[in-house]
Image (cartoon, rainbow, N blue to C red):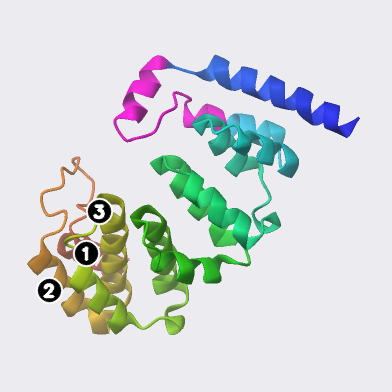
Amino acid sequence: MAETTVAEVMAEVMAELAELEDPKAREVNEKHGDDHGVNLSKLRALAKRLKTQQELACRLWETDDTAARLLAILICRPKAFERDELDVMLREARTPKVHDWLVNYVVKKNPHSEKLRLAWSADSDPVVASAGWALTTEHVTKKPEDLDLTGLLDVIEAEMSDAPDRLQWAMNHCLAQIGIEHGEHRARAIDIGERLEVLKDYPTPPGCTSPFAPIWITEMVRRQHDN
């Protein structure tokens, strides 16, 4: 009976996702590499209604549909996944939004996150490696005692300029976070950013902070002092 129930709910959910599809939203999302047209506020509302359903989440993930996978991330139990399951899921998550949500909403809350951080950071696939760097960036703030910050800066200095886009972005975020959180490394972090010039010319909307590390670090430190 339970099998039938999950199958029925699955069919209803996929039908609802199809109804939520908006061609204009898809057009905007595709510019960022995301192949779905579902408004994320509506997706979150659907997830809130469904609540946590691990089996349904796994079924939704298996569809390989981006909107379904985003919904799966929102209704799953992050601690229920084994390390190998998350490794496979990350390698399957090739659109930026699915990748980011999986790392931030699931992997960070999973007991295997540290082992995955270490493994992914050294992976030859730059998209997988970017997930490792995203987890490391969180450690820079929450568990810096686990890290060799000088060593991280050495790697960033040597490799960030030539890294593929997703990996470069993640390494740059880590560089900025080190500079923001750790005053003893701030001057070097700013110097690395200035010399490498990664994201220096990134188009930044009015009122937003540039991702160029020297500007980002300086602005966030200023805000900390103002508060």
Cα distance, mark 3 to mark 2? Answer: 21 Å
The amino acid at mark 3 is: Pro
Magenta stretch in the rendered image:
23-43
Q: Secondary structure at mark 2?
A: helix
The mark found on residue 164 in the picture is 3
137 inside magenta stretch = no
Q: From the image, which quarter does the N terminus lie in?
A: top right
**Residue at 39% over, 69% down:** 122
Q: From the image, which quarter does the C terminus lie in?
A: bottom left
Q: x, y percentage for residue 43?
A: 55, 30
Disc 1 target residue = 160
Is residue 101 in view? no
Relative height, residue 71 to residue 93 (above, below)? above
The nearer-to-camera label among 3 and 2 is: 3
Disc 2 target residue = 191
Residue 12, picture quadrant? top right
Task: Determine whether, in the image, residue 193 is placed left or right of residue 14.
Answer: left
**Residue at 25% over, 62% down:** 172
Relative height, residue 105 to residue 196 (above, below)? above
Looking at the image, the residue that sits furthest to the left is: 195
Q: Residues within 10 Å of mark 1 (few under 14, many from 20)?
A: many
Question: Tag 1 or tag 2, which sits nearer the N-term?
Answer: 1
Q: Secondary structure at mark 1?
A: loop
The amino acid at mark 1 is: Met
